[in-house]
Amino acid sequence: MDTFRDLPARIFYKHPRLLAFVFLAAISFVAYVNALPNSFHFDDVVGVVRNPTIRDLKYIPSYFTDPSTFALGRTREWRPVLQITYALNYSIAGLNPIVFRVFNLLFHLGTAFLIFLVITEICEHPPRKLQSDSRVPVALPALFAASLFAVHTANTEAVDYIWARSSVLATFFYLLAFYCFLRGPFSDGRSKQLPWHAAGLLSFALGVGTKATAVTLPAVLVLYEILFLNPAGKSPPRLFLDEPRRIKKYIPVIAVFFAYLAIRTLLLPRMFTNIAAAREVSSLSYLLTQFRAWIYYLKLFLWPHPLLVDFAGFGWSHSLWDIKVLLSLGLISALLVVAWRVRRTKPLISFFAFWYFVALLPEASFIPLADAVVGYRAYPAYIALAVIAAMLGLEGCLWLWNRFGGSDERNASRLRHLCVMLGSLVLAALIAATIARNRDWRDGMTLWSDVIQKDPANPRAYMMLGAQFLNQEDYENAKEMLEHAIRLRPGRSHAYVLRGYLNSRLNRHEEALSDLDRAVQLDSRAPYAYFYRGELHRRTGEYEKALADYHAALRFLPFYTDAYLGLAMTHLEKHETAKAIEACTKLVGIDPEDRRGYDCLGNLFIEQGRFPEAVALYQQGTRRIPRDSGLWYGLGVAHEKNGNYEEAGNAFEKAGRLTSETNQRSPIMIPLVE
């Protein structure tokens, strides 16, 4: 019986990597399968749903050279690797959120498995062996750390939120690069170093090409060398001064680092200035606030509640003498001191304690960002906490073993089973909490209602709920939510844009214009305010003002197809056909999967008697969007005008079939919110 009971353990010890991957895949699937059909949310709209540059693989080269392709928003970033994954997802199944989330989950699983590989790689080789007691193979705590990370509820935002893929993907490449360096130049010659070194450099380049958070890898490598490749225990300066040859392996990494900085400086020369100027908080206040955030992320890992998509209630700290800042600094200092003091006896715990703080530095230090706390920012830092939790759990099990197990194998076996049972209970509880949290991400109504329930004074939540009601054409509730948002935060433009759009839908032109003017006054760089004010001016016949507003929107969003359509309609109403054709052509060129461009340009071609061009255009449209009945109908009209009656009949028949099958209803265009 004992032999049969120990069979799974023996199989695991024989094939640890395969069994670890299968186990991690199974628990990750159980934890996140109910999240896969959830809808797109918040920045998913500007970055994915309405971003025309991910809908055609022809844009991939421009991801490396044009930061304006990043999203249909004002944010300019250089993350070409991230954008390529979005474009690949779209090429597979269009805007199917399941495909996008499967990619998120796969990279999350990959990161968890890399945790297992990294820990076993560090601990399996003398003199860095975790402990000399062979009764607890290192694969077990490594697997628990990886499992803890895989299903931890604090990571749900990074996995559920498609726009947070930047953190998931960058962390995957970051950890992959670290593992490759462990196998290569940091391996003490145990393996062929050159291939692993090259793979590490490539992974690091992919990481920084995904998100700037990956830039801290060189610091982590130096930290690893100080703690694990320093048998004499020399101080960091003395270690490299006495043995300058150690520096050689860092040269390629530093070269990639500076190449990345050069690219960012060239493409985003005013990035940091613009961020600091556009925010309501100084660099000092942001840094003081982040001291609290570091401890808050730690608290969320220990007890993941409340989890919010927006932590508006966290607040800002503006003084070093703020009691919360002082307490946070005291706790941070204590943790760092303890980590340094145990560096010789518990190097793994010490290393990952420093990892936690290093991983947070790019987004949680002195460079002001829009929000004080964001759930997915801590994703790479939670690797460290998962490992530390597993190692402390192992220490606890070994203490119990030595205290109560003794030499009695029966007692030792019971303690092993007790530790496994306790670990399983922790994982089961986290899986249940993760499944429950996934339900909050089902759609915009559930997500923002959850925020209001947990933080009733959150203005963004009311604004986003207002947008949801607008989408459902529930104008009464939309008005209530938007006015509540404006009362809570009257100095932000977004809610005014939404309320202006609502008023324009209700034909309250004066109220709409007042709201949109106010939005522009509060934020002179608000492209959606300009666009919807342009729409209002066009509807009231003020064409020159409309054109000025459309062009203002396009200055900030060069790929804003709505604005090109507005230009075309305005020029058409002014009987400026050539300019209307130019705008429609631009629309089709930017987004060949936007049916409005084909209708706009096709109708103009037909009006001008350019029937063969209209036929060719509609044929292009039906190839790109074969299920659109309107485009097939337009193709029928173009064929009919061109004298192709049989082809016209076939196109009309196709349009009729599609109309009856899909019962198409054109959605209203809700203003985007960043």
Image: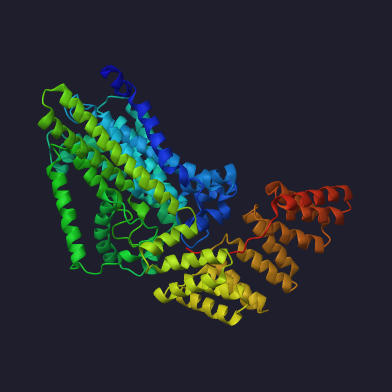
- Residue 475 lies, in percent from the top left, at 56, 71
- Residue 351 lies, in percent from the top left, at 22, 41
In the displayed structure, does residue 613 sit left or right of residue 571?
Answer: right
Camera-side residue of 280 and 660: 660
- The structure residue drawn at horizontal position 81% and vertical position 60%, both measured from the top left corner, is 606
Camera-side residue of 41 and 192: 41
- The structure residue drawn at horizontal position 67% and vertical position 63%, both measured from the top left corner, is 583
Task: Please say if 101 is above or below 325.
Answer: above
Residue 535 appears in the rendering: yes
Quarter of the N terminus within the rendering? top left
View extreme (bottom): residue: 510
In the displayed structure, does residue 401 sit left or right of residue 465?
Answer: left
Q: Quadrant of residue 17?
A: top left
Residue 256 appears in the rendering: no
In the displayed structure, does residue 373 sit left or right of residue 77?
Answer: left
> How was this image coloured?
rainbow
In the displayed structure, does residue 508 sit left or right of residue 483?
Answer: right
* Number of numbered callouts drawn: 0
- Residue 569 lies, in percent from the top left, at 69, 69
Q: Quadrant of residue 4?
A: top left
Camera-side residue of 94 and 619: 94
- Residue 260 lies, in percent from the top left, at 39, 48
